[in-house]
Amino acid sequence: MARGEGAEQYAASLLPVKPIKTEIKTVKPKDQRTRLTVWNKLCYAVGGAPYQITGSALGFFLQIYLLDVAQLDPFHASIILFVGRAWDAVTDPTVGFLVSRSRWTSVGRMMPW
């Protein structure tokens, strides 16, 4: 018998069998859950404000630039702005999915990206 042959029939009996955990976790009632304070909510809101302000300003001034300076047709200017938003609608969830699936490194989860 060659080395490694015939061991398949005995391999399953050598593996330890672990019992299945049947614990049921209960959810706390709503009044016992810790709620965010108003201060925490404001801090979360302030974190996204610079991104929103920048996006609004760029969209506003880009529209003026495309219509007045570049002399584009309004249809083409709106298509340019729409394609940018549509591209964000596809790439943002995709990158979020990839980042959430990536492994933790010594410097964090998002550093490899």
Image: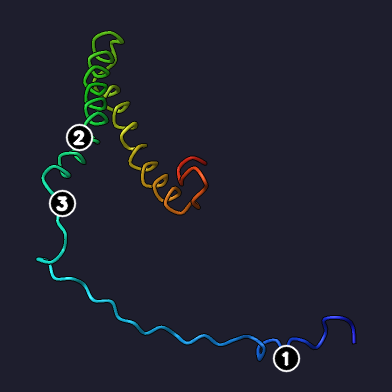
> Which numbered disc, 3 or 1, marks the residue that appears first in the sequence?
1
Q: How far across and down, in percent of the image, does residue 54 sit?
A: 26, 25
Question: Which residue is depicted at the point 52% across and 46% down?
Answer: 106
Mark 2 and mark 3: span between their CA atoms?
A: 15 Å
Circles 1, 2 touching at the beta carbon (< 8 Å): no
Amino acid at pointer 2: Val
Element marked by disc 1:
helix
The residue under the point 37% across, 43% down is 90
**80 vs 58, nearest the viewer:** 58
Q: Is residue 36 above or below residue 62?
A: below
Q: Which residue is mark 2?
A: 46
Q: State if disc 3 and disc 2 touch (CB < 8 Å).
A: no
Q: Is residue 1 above or below residue 96?
A: below
Mark 1 Cα shell of 10 Å, populated few (<14), some (14-19), many (≥20): few
Q: Is residue 76 left or right of residue 41?
A: right
The residue where tag 3 is placed is: 36
Q: Amino acid at mark 1?
A: Gln
Q: Which residue is mark 1?
A: 9
